[in-house]
Image (tube, rainbow, N blue to C red):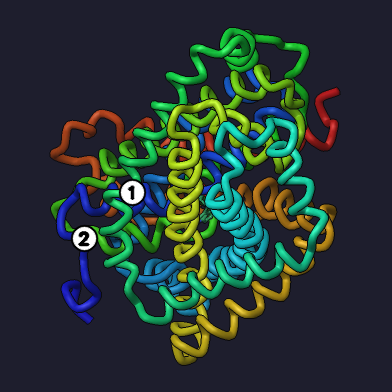
Amino acid sequence: MTNTDRGQWRSRMGFILAAAGGAVGLGNIWKFPYVAGMNGGSAFLLVYLVLILFLGLPVLIAEVMLGKATQRNPVGAFKALDHEKSPWRMIGFMGVLAAFMILSFYSVVAGWCIEFIIQGAKGAYSSSSSPEDVQKLFAALTSSPSKQILYHGIFISMTIAIVYAGVQSGLQRVCEVLMPLLIVILIALIVFAMKQEGWQKGVRFLLEPDASKLTPNTILAAMGQCFFSLSLGMGAMLTYGSYLRKEDNVVSSSAWVAVMDTGIALLAGFVIFPIVFTFGVEPAAGPGLVFVSLPGAFQQLPAGTIAGIGFFVLLLAAAVTSAISLLEVIAAYFVDEFKMDRRKVSIGFGFLCFLIGIGCAVSGNFFDILDKTSSNYLLPIGALLISMFAGWVLKREIAQSDFKDTKFAKLFGLWLSSVRFIAPVLVVLVFLNKLGVFK
Ligand code: TRP
C-alpha cells in the first residue's frame, strides 16, 4: 500500500492538532488536577514537568518516529523494523491490554460529563440554586450505578459509532475548532479564579516547593500521569505518526503536542485549585474533584449556565477524540493481526469495554485498580520498551533522518542518549523507589 492510500494529514498543523486532540482529554482537565491534589500539589507538579521534558518528550518523539518510518500500526511497525516473530511485538499486545483498561474507566468518567450537561440544562448553575446543592450532585451521581451505566453506555456507543463509520478525520476537524474554544473557556475561568479569595492559596498549593511531600508514590503518580496525558506507551502516538508526511518534522511536531498538552493541564490546575480553596473543597478529594468544585464557580459567573454547559460539552468532545484513539489501537490490532472485520471488531470490543466499565460504575475500588494499573505500570513499561527499541534496535540512519538537516540536528545526540539511557533508567528508578529500595 502506498503512502497516499492510507491517507495523510493535510499539513503539519493538521498532525499537531489531531495528535494534540487525541492527547488532550479527561487526562488534562479531570485527572491532572485530582492526581496533583492527592499527591501534594507543588511536589507533584515539579516532578511532572521534569518528567515531561526528560521522559515524555523523548518517548513521544520515538513513537512518532517509529510510526512515520513504518507507516504501520503498533504491532506491524515492530514487525516491519525487526522481523515477523519479533519479541518487540509484545509492546503492541500490552498496548491493547492498556487500551481496554483505560477505555473502560475513561468512558465512565466521560459519562459523568453528560450528567453535568443535563444538570446545567435543568438550571443547576444558575444563581437561583444553592452552592450546597450543586456540590452534592457528584455524590448523588456516583451513588447511582444505573445512571452512570446509562451515560457510560451512551458515551461508548458514540465512540464505537465514530470508529465504525471511520469518520475520525471529520471529527478531528470539528475538534480543531473546539480545542481553541476549550482554551478560551479555561482562560476565562482563570480570570474568574484570580478574583476569588482562594487564588493565592491555590497558586501556593501548586508552586510553593515542599520537599516533605515528595514521596515515592508522588513520583510514581507523576510518571503515570506524564504517559497518560501524552497518550504514550501503547502505540497511540505511533499510529498518529504513521500518517505524517515525509517532509514533516517529527521533532518539532512532537514538541508542539507536548507543549499544548502540558499547557492545557496547567491551565486546568490554575483554574481548579483556587476554586477548590475558595469553596472549601478538599484538594485530595479524588476523582470527583473537578465535578465537585467547578459547578459552584459556574453559579457565580454572570452567564453561568451557558459557561457550565459549554465547559462540559467541550470536555465531552475532548474525551471523545481521546477515546477513539484508544478504540482505534484495539481495532487496528485485531484487524491487522487476525484479519478480523473492522466493523465487527469496533462493536465487539467496544461492547467488552462497556461491560468492564460497568464494574467501574459499581465499584470505586475496581475503578482505581484499572486506572492505577494502566497508568502507573502498563504505560511506563510500554514506554520503556518503546524507547529502548528506538534507541538500540532501530537503525541509526532512520532515527537520524528526522534530525539531520533540520534545526534540531544538534539535539540528536541528546535524544539518542535519552531513549537509550535516561528514559529507561528513570522508569526503573521510579519503580525501585516505589518498592522501597532507596529507603
Ligand atoms: N491522553 C488522553 C487524555 O489525556 C487519554 C488517552 C488517549 C490515552 N489515548 C491514550 C492515554 C493512549 C494513554 C494511552 O485524556
In the picture, the quarter occupied by the N terminus is bottom left
Name which of mark 1 and mark 2 comes first in the sequence. 2
Q: Is residue 69 left or right of residue 158?
A: left
Number of residues whose C-alpha sits closer than 10 Å to that of mark 2, classed few (under 14), some (14–19) or many (20 or more): some
Task: Evaluate whether residue 405 shows in this view.
Answer: yes
Label at residue 167: none
Q: Which residue is mark 1?
A: 178
The quadrant holding residue 201 is: top right
Which quarter shows the C terminus? Answer: top right
Judge left or right: residue 90 versus residue 179.
right
Q: Residues within 10 Å of mark 1 (few under 14, many from 20)?
A: some
Q: What residue sits right under mark 2 in the picture?
A: 9
Name the residue: 52% across, 78% down: 85
Residue 279 image offset from top left, x and y in percent = 68, 22
Say above or below: 118 vs 188.
below
The type of residue carrying mark 2 is Trp
In percent of the image, x 68 and y 38: which residue is there?
134
Q: Give the image location of residue 388, x and y in percent.
A: 51, 49
From the viewer's side, name the closer residue of 325 and 382: 325
Callout 1: SS: helix
Query: Which residue is the extreme one toward the front?
Result: 128
Contact, mark 1 vs mark 2 (Cβ under 8 Å): no
Q: Nearer the viewer, residue 253 or 147?
A: 147
Q: Residue at x 44, y 86 (%)?
A: 342
